[in-house]
């Protein structure tokens, strides 16, 4: 079953007769992934205590551990046992689940809740709203508002904050702001969540950001900016992949550029590529062309080859869009 746009699912109907539920998000979980997973996880534990619920994610970044329940996240799947329902959150395709994919495949039923425009509705039940600011916003729409606790509100607020760039990205709708207000009325400290999980950086994060900015280049008549962080730099700064979050968004802020391209070398001749656009280029189309996905203004893909090959292949696709007049409709 596929549900898009203004249609919604009834959570109670999906949970009916379920005894064991698992949920998981995408590899290298970001703020929205953690926020949506923890928000729904905490809500189910509080409102459906008769259902055994587990959440599976790769290691939660330190900054997000202020959210309740993150110490209960499982980073390995059990050798035995299956679930009646697996809920996939903030994943454009099943492969993005990473290590928890086998649990999805073995589950009695599956549900996907997501806002990626590239999502192809791969679960039994699919609640996909590309116009939504975040998966955390979608989770809010499924819950009974009066039953949302402060802990649940904190998780969902964090998710919305991160995928809207603290409410500055074009995906921020009036409904997004109204939902944020409802969450704040639960007594959360919104300013602390923003400061601790979005703006605050460790010394290592600032160092690796400095390297990325210092070694960045303007290309394509200064319409694009690109930067590459290699494994040797990661070792030098003793940085982890989670320390790279936010770099591509900082690159995107460069005056005059339309697209930011950030390459992170994950192994020799293999790169994780993050793309950000100001609007003239639909980077989700580019990412999908190379096997990735995402949104109109934020997308990603993993590509093999030398850094020059990867950059040349991506910029060739960017050029195809920049050569046409007009901007794609933002979603």
Image: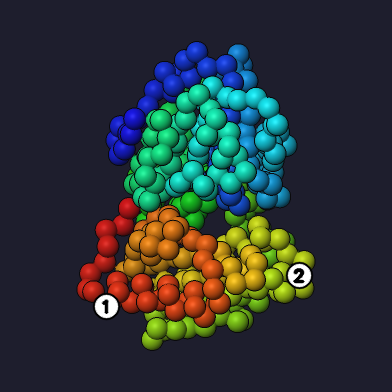
Q: Is residue 121 above or below residue 229?
A: above
Secondary element at image label 2? helix
Crowdedness of circle 2 by 10 Å Cα count: few (<14), some, many (20+)?
few
Q: Is residue 48 visible?
A: yes
241 over 42 or under it: above or below:
below
Taking the spot 33% from the left edge, 77% from the top edge, the residue there is 319
Q: Position of residue 42 (x, y in %)?
A: 60, 28
Instruction: Tell me if 286 is positioned left or right of 211 in this view.
Output: left
Question: Which quadrant holds residue 21?
Answer: top right
Count of numbered tags = 2
Q: Quadrant of residue 211?
A: bottom right
x and y, in percent, of residue 260 in the image: 46, 71
Q: Which mark is residue 323?
A: 1
**N-term-proximal mark, 1 vs 2:** 2
Residue beneath the point at 73% across and 64% down: 239
In-image side of 180 versus 196 (left or right): left
What is the secondary structure assignment of the residue under circle 1?
loop
Can you give x and y, in whole percent of width and height, for residue 184 in the image? 52, 37
Q: Residue at x 62, y 43 (%)?
A: 99
Indicate left or right for 6 with 98 as reference: left
Give x and y (percent) for residue 189. Answer: 60, 41
The residue beneath circle 2 is 235
Q: Residue at x 53, y 28 (%)?
A: 107
Q: CA distance from mark 1 to mark 2?
A: 40 Å
């Amino acid at each position: 079953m596929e549900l898009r746009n203004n249609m919604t699912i009834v959570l109670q109907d999906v949970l009916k007769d379920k005894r064991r539920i698992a949920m998981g998000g995408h590899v290298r979980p970001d703020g929205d992934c953690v926020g949506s997973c923890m928000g729904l996880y905490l809500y189910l534990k509080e409102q459906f205590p008769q259902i055994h619920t587990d959440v599976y994610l790769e290691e939660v970044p330190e900054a997000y551990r202020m959210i309740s329940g993150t110490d209960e996240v499982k980073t390995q799947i059990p050798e035995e046992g299956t679930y009646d329902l697996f809920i996939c959150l903030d994943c454009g395709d099943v492969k993005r689940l990473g290590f928890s994919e086998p649990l999805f495949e073995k589950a009695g039923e599956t549900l996907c809740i997501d806002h990626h425009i590239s999502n192809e509705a791969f679960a039994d039940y699919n609640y996909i709203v590309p116009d939504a600011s975040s998966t955390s916003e979608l989770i809010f729409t499924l819950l009974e508002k009066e039953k949302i606790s402060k802990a649940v509100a904190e998780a969902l607020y964090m998710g919305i904050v991160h995928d809207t760039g603290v409410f500055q990205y074009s995906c921020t709708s009036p409904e997004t702001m109204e939902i944020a207000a409802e969450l704040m009325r639960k007594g959360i400290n919104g300013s602390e969540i923003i400061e601790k999980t979005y703006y605050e950086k460790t010394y290592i994060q600032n160092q690796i950001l400095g390297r990325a900015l210092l070694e960045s280049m303007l290309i394509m008549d200064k319409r694009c900016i690109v930067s590459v962080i290699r494994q040797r730099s990661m070792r030098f700064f003793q940085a982890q992949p989670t320390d790279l979050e936010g770099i591509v968004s900082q690159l995107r802020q460069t005056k005059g550029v339309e697209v930011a391209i950030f390459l992170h070398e994950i192994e020799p001749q293999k790169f994780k590529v993050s793309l950000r656009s100001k609007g003239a280029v639909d980077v989700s189309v580019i990412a999908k062309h190379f096997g990735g996905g995402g949104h109109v203004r934020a997308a990603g893909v993993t590509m093999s080859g030398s850094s020059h090959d990867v950059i040349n292949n991506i910029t060739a696709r960017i050029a195809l869009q920049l050569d046409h007049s007009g901007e794609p409709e933002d979603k």
